[in-house]
Image: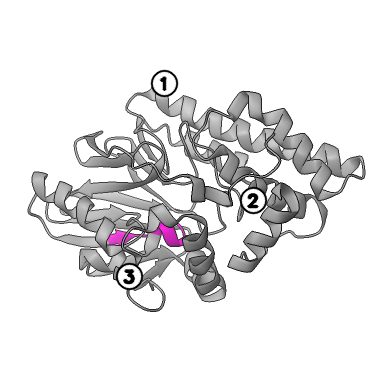
Amino acid sequence: MTPTKTFASQADLEEKKISFTRISEHAWAYTAEGDPNTGVIIGDDAVLVADTQATPAMAQDVIRRIREVTDKPIRYVLLTHYHAVRVLGASAYGAEQIIASQDTYDLIVERGEADKASEIGRFPRLFSNVETVPPGMTWPTMTFSGRMTLWLGKLEVQLLQLGRGHTKGDTVAWLPGERALLSGDLVEFGATPYAGDAYFKDWPETLRRVEALQPQVLVPGRGAALTTPQEVAQGLADTRQFIADVYASVQAGVAAGQDLNAVYRATYAALKPKYGHWVIFDHCMPFDVTRCYDEATQYADPRIWTAERDVEMWKALEG
């Protein structure tokens, strides 16, 4: 392991190739080689966008792709969770409603400002034209708990909270008629799950509930669109295995009385051969192991990340 890595993703400056792929009759995937994805549902009379990109300037490219295939109004924006990289582009769409789970709304109240400052510091490239973000927070205009059904004409869209995983507010968009799922960061494909705000004990069970829907196609939070049942199964299995592997390694270290530094070094070394080729592995691991160590020791709920805490953690583990 390199003794000192460049803080978080500040070494990650390469622009990614964007794809806009139709995965079912009404669902589309906006993907960018491991950068955050956006899911799009084009109904009979309106469009829903799930996860907005990180800035209004970046959202304009999503809108351009949508306008190449439909002129229907973008009526709904869904925030699958509260992370800034997913929500700060929302204002660009001019949607009638910005929808989120009540848990996501509560997290924005509690830690939205701190998370925004933290994420922009971690991911400068992902916040292109950050000056286009309006002041303040992106606030949902409509919230729900558990489940909510939208009708885009005759198209049924179910918004479901299947359990805690990536965050406590995770929401998926499910098209039961065509078995298409927009998972947000509950599922990744060829990209390292960020678990700094996660619930390690719950996440695998939540993925089993995703699996129980039997999706045939899926837009993950990061990575290529999953366009066959085999790819969907792989994405679910890989995400679940990564979370389980981190948790098992951290638990073993905690049981042996090791401190966070020792647990991090051991977990990084154990997982690097298997997952080191995944996008943002080096970026995610300090945050993932720190949160997992917290959960395995004394913090049932994730502590708030601030820009200052990010740097302190990074120096302690990588500096």
Mark 1 nearby-residue class (10 Å; few <14, some 14–19, many ≥20): few
Marking on residue 287: 2
Q: Position of residue 240 (x, y in %)?
A: 59, 34
Mark 3 nearby-residue class (10 Å; few <14, some 14–19, many ≥20): few
Numbered disc in front, either 1 or 3 = 3
Residue found 54% across the figure and 64% down from its top: 118
Q: Amino acid at mark 3?
A: Glu
Query: For the view shown, which residue lies furthest in the right direction?
Result: 257
Upstream in sequence: badge 2 or badge 1: 1
Q: Position of residue 64 (x, y in %)?
A: 15, 51
Is 83 magenta? The answer is yes
Q: Is residue 90 left or right of residue 93?
A: right
Q: Quadrant of residue 53?
A: bottom left
Mark 2 nearby-residue class (10 Å; few <14, some 14–19, many ≥20): many
Marking on residue 292: none
User: Residue at label 3?
Assistant: 131
Q: Quadrant of residue 89?
A: bottom left
Q: CA distance from mark 2 to mark 1?
A: 30 Å
Q: Amino acid at mark 2?
A: Phe
Q: Is residue 80 at all visible to an observer of this figure?
A: no
The magenta-colored residue range is 77-86
Which of 141/243 is in front? 243
Query: For the view shown, which residue lies furthest in the top direction?
Result: 230
Q: CA distance from mark 1 to mark 3?
A: 41 Å
Tell me the element at label 3.
helix
Q: Position of residue 40 (x, y in %)?
A: 25, 48
